[in-house]
Amino acid sequence: MPIDQHAARRRWYREFFGSMIAFAATLVLADFVVEANPDAGWRYAVALLPVIPGALVVVAAVRFHRRIDELQQRIALEAIALAFAGTAVITFIYGFAEDAVDLPRVNWTWVWGVMGGLWLICDFIVRRRRL
């Protein structure tokens, strides 16, 4: 990977992990405040505070994608597409099985965890195949 690609990746890590740390901190804080004030009318606004650093994750991803070369962009797009399709299949299977076999209901926030995990796995596989 050329030096400018290394710089792009380092900047991505800095922006991504900074946003994720802010997301985790606001999530814990918002959860604590909402639980401590169950009757407050403003708790809905506080519960949405983690969306702001979550949006910064999207900004970091778009900026990284614009900084990398065409081959790296193609690899990233292929990995994201495979992760999206894999997440769709997994969630459909679990959703149908939830009703058929009486599996426990799963919170929707787990969908991002599945997609993020598959994205990492697919990125590794696509890079091994392309590079």
Image (spheres, grey):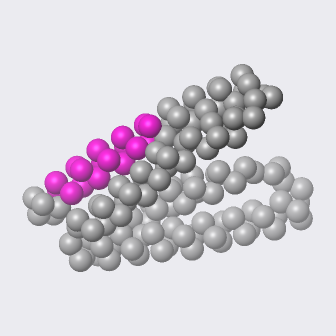
x and y percentages locating residue 42 in the rendered image = 69, 35
Residue name at image x 21 percent, y 72 percent: 69
Residue name at image x 65 percent, y 26 percent: 33
x and y percentages locating residue 126 in the rendered image = 36, 71
Residue 55 falls inside the magenta stretch: no
x and y percentages locating residue 85 in the rendered image = 57, 74
- Against 85, is 54 above or below? above
Residue name at image x 30 percent, y 73 percent: 73
Q: Residue 23 or 72: which is nearer the viewer?
A: 23
Quadrant in which the N terminus is drawn: bottom left
- Against 37, is 109 above or below? below
Q: Residue 41 or 126: which is nearer the viewer?
A: 41
| Left-right relation of 43 to 84 | right
| Left-right relation of 3 to 8 | left
Report the residue that reaches farthest toward the front.
41
Classify residue 46 by image quadrant. Answer: top right
Residue 126 in sight in this render: no
How many numbered marks appear? 0
- The stretch of residues the image draws in magenta is 6-22
| Left-right relation of 67 to 33 | left
- Against 86, is 48 above or below? above
Residue name at image x 69 percent, y 64 percent: 91
Q: Main secondary structure of the magenta part?
A: helix
Residue 108 in sight in this render: yes
Classify residue 6 by image quadrant. Answer: bottom left
Classify residue 39 by image quadrant. Answer: top right
x and y percentages locating residue 30 in the rendered image = 61, 32
Report the residue that reaches farthest toward the left.
3
Quadrant in which the C terminus is drawn: bottom left
Q: Residue 118 or 28: which is nearer the viewer?
A: 28
| Left-right relation of 62 to 67 | right
